Image (tube, grey):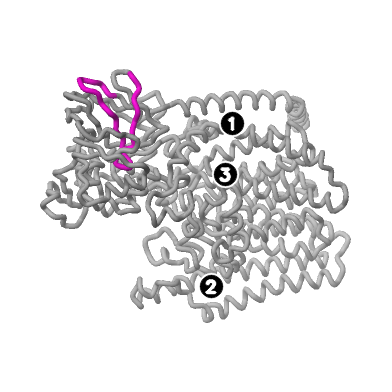
Amino acid sequence: MKINRWIAPLLVMVISFIFLREMILDGKIPESADMFHRMPLDRWVEHYTANNEDMPQWYPHLFGGMPSYGGFIHAPADPLRKVFDALDFNWGMRYWLHFVIAGVGMYCYLRRRNLSKIPSLFGSLAFSLSPYMFGLINAGHPAKLYAITFIPLVILFAEKVIAERKLRNALGLALFTALQLWTKHVQICYYTWMLIVFFWFWQEGKELKSGTFKAKLFGRRLAILSVAVLLSGILVADPYLPIYEFQGHSTRGAASSLPSVGEARKGTSWDYATQWSFHPKETISLFFPYFYGLQNFPSRDLNSQAYWGQMPFTQSTHYMGLIVLVLAVVGFLIQKADSFKISVAVASMIILVIGFGEHFPFLYWPLFELAPMFGRFRVPSMIYILLPFTCSILASIAIHDFANAAKNSLSENTQMRIIITLGFMVGLSIFLFLFGSEMLSFSKLGEATRFQPPLIEQIKDVRIHLFQTGALLALLLSSGLFLTVWLTLKEKITGFVMGGVLLGLTIVDLWVVNSEFIHLRSERAAVSGYRPTETVKFLDSNRGLHRIMPIEQFNTNWYAYFGHSTVGGYRPVKLRSYQDILDAQALNNGAVQDMLNVRYVITDKILPGNQYQLVHQSDMKVYEKSSVLPKAWFVDNTLSAKDMSESLDIILERDFNPRNTAVVQGFDMNSGLAVGSVKVTEYSENRITLETQSEGDGFLVLSENYYGPGWKASIGGVETKIYRTNHLLRGVNVPSGNHTIMFTADHSTFRTARLISLLGIVLTLTAIGVLYCSDLRSFIKYIEREKERIGG
C-alpha cells in the first residue's frame, strides 16, 4: 500500500502534539525542582533586559556573584531560542517543535537507509517519543532534550559526508552540529560524535577487510569532516568562547586548592563522575519499565520513594518500548544481518557497557582516562540517550525485513525461532506478573536506617503495585506482538497491516509510560511558590549592598527571586575558588562571613548573641551580623601568598582578620599602607564605581568574586591590576589622594565571539543558499504540481 510522502511527517507532528497537548494549549509546565530553581534567573533576565540595552556579564545574586554569560545563566546565542522568544512560544510549543525535529529527522534518516514508510514512521515515533524525553521534561532539563532531538539529523549529514564527500553535505552537518551545540549541552553533542566516529571507523574497517580501503579516500573524508566541525565551531563561537574561558576557572576545569580534593584530577573526579552509573542488573528495566519503580515521582508522598534501584535517585527511565527492544533482537532471526545492521547492534552493546560506569568499568575507565574531554562529564548512564536511536533503527529494519520476508514466506525453522523468542517474552511476563512480587525484595540499601518499619512496608506496597502494573503492561504488549507476528506468518494479515498494528501498540506503550512523567500545573501556580514571606518583606525593607546567608535554604535560589544576593544557591557549576570555600566549610567562620559581606543570617535556629543580633522573627529568624564588612574597605597590611592553596590556608586560620589584613597573590607591599574612606556610587551587573580618599598609598578590598578574564579596573581612567585577594575576592592598590575607581565587566571575549559567529552564520547561509538553490527550485515546482493536481 502506498502512502503519501507527507503523511508520515504529519503523523509525527499530530501524535507528538497529542502527547503534549496540555502544555501547548493550556500553557502548563511540569512540577520540576530545576525549573522552579530557574525562575529567579529568568525573572532577573526579564528585569535586566527590560531596563538595559547591554548584555549582563555578571550575576550578583548567587554564590557571591558569578559570570552570567559564560556561566550558563544567560547566554542567548541559540538562533532557535531567539525565534521562539520573539514568537512568545510557551514551553509546550518549544518541546513540541523539537519533538517534530527529532521525528522528522529520524524519518529522513531511515528513509535514506532505504526502509519503507511504515517502518520509518515506526522508528521516527519510537525515537522522538521515547520515555527518556518525557523524563527530561519531568526533571526540567530542556537543554538536554533539545540536544537529543538533533541526533538523527547530525548523524544523517555525517553519513552523507562520508558517503558522498560533498561540500553541501558538510555545510548541512556544520549547521545541525551548531544547532545541537547551541543548546549548550556539550555532553550530548560529544556522545553524538562518538557514534559518528564509530560508524565511520566501522565502514573504514569493512573496506580494509574487503581490500577496497584507500588512504586517499580516508584522507578526503577526514578533511571534509574536519571542515564541517571547524565551521560548526565558528558558528558557535558565541557562546562557547566565554563558556570555555569560564571553564578554566570553574569547578569543571580548575583543580581544587584543598589537599583532600586537590589529589583528585582537574575537572571531575572518578567518584563524582561515576554517580548515576547504571547497574547491569537494572538492564531488565529496559524491557519492564516498572521493575525498579520507574522513577522517584515528584509527588510529596510515598511515590517519591518508588525507585529502588542502585542509582541515588532518578527522574527518568531508559525504557524505550518493549516492542522496540524485542523487535531489535528478533530482527536478527529474520534474515542474515548486513554490515550496517551489525554495526548498529555492536554500537548498542558498547553504549550499554559504557553506561555501567563504576559497576563494570571495562569501557568507561579507559574512556575516562584517555578520551579527550570525556573525563569532564558525569552521569555515565546519560550515554543511553543513544539507545533509542540505535534500537529504533534495528526495530525499524526488523519490521521492514519482516514485511518483505512475509511475501516470500520464511522457512519453518526461522518461523519457529521467532515464535519461541516471542513466546519466551510472553511467558516471562506471565511469570513476573504471577510470582515476581513474591521473589523480589523491593528494598533499597540504607532505607532501614532512614524509615520506620511501618513506613517501609507502605513504600514496598507502592513498589509492588508499580511492578505488577508494569508486568501486566508487558504481558499485554508481548501478547499483542506475538499474535500480530503469528498472524503475519500465517498470512492472515499483510506486512503493512503488521507494521501499522505494531506502531499502534508502541504508541499505546509510550503513552502509558510517558504519562507517568507528565505532572503539570499552571505557570501561575508555579510562580505562587515564590510568594513573599514576612522574612522576605523584612529583607525588602532593609535592602542594601550586602548579602544574606540562609542556612536551611542555602542550596536554593529562593531569595534570589526577590533580588537578594546570597552566598548560597543552586547551580551545577560555579567558580572553583568559591567551591573551595564551600568544600572547606569556611562559611561557618565568622571572619569569612564578614569579608563576604554577609549582613543577615536566616535560620530557624538560635544563634549566639555575641556575634548575631536577632532583628526579625516570623516564618524564620533573621540575625544581623554586627561585624559585617562593607562592600569595599581599606586594610592596614597585606600578606603575600604564592598560590591559591596558601591563600586558602591563611584565611582559614582562626586569627585571620579580614578587616585589617588582606591575603594577596602577587602583591609585595605589606606595610605602611594608609587606611582611607570609600563610598560605592554605582553598583550594577557590568560596572561598580567607588569614590576613595586616602592620605597615602593603600590597598582596597572589594567584596566581589575574583574572575580574572571577566573584569577590568581603572583608577582615574587609567587601567590598574586587579589582585586575587583573600583567595576569592578582588583587591586594587590605590595611590594617595581622591580617586574614582571603576570595575568594568570585560566584554571583549563576548564581542569577539559574537562577531565570529555572525560572520560564520552569514557565510554558511549564503553557501547553503547557493548550493541548495536547485533543490529549492525543484521543491517549489513540486508544490505547484501538487496544487494543480489537488485543484484539478
Residue 578, horizontal then vertical, whole percent: 35, 45
Residue 96, quarter of picture: top right
Where disc 2 sits, the SS reads helix
Q: Of the residues tagged 1 and 3, which is closer to the observer?
A: 1
Where disc 1 sits, the SS reads helix
Q: Of the residues tagged 2 and 1, which is closer to the observer?
A: 1
In this view of the protein, which residue sits in the foreground, 210 or 316?
210
The numbered disc on residue 468 is 2
Above or below: residue 264 compared with residue 639: below
**Could you tell me which residue is drawn at 57 percent across and 42 percent down?**
98
Above or below: residue 131 compared with residue 231: below
Residue 720 is covered by the magenta coloring: yes
- Mark 2 and mark 3 lie on one chain; the one further toward the N terminus is 3
What range of the chain is rendered magenta?
A: 718-741
What distance separates the C-alpha of mark 2 from that of mark 3? 34 Å
Residue type at mark 1?
Leu
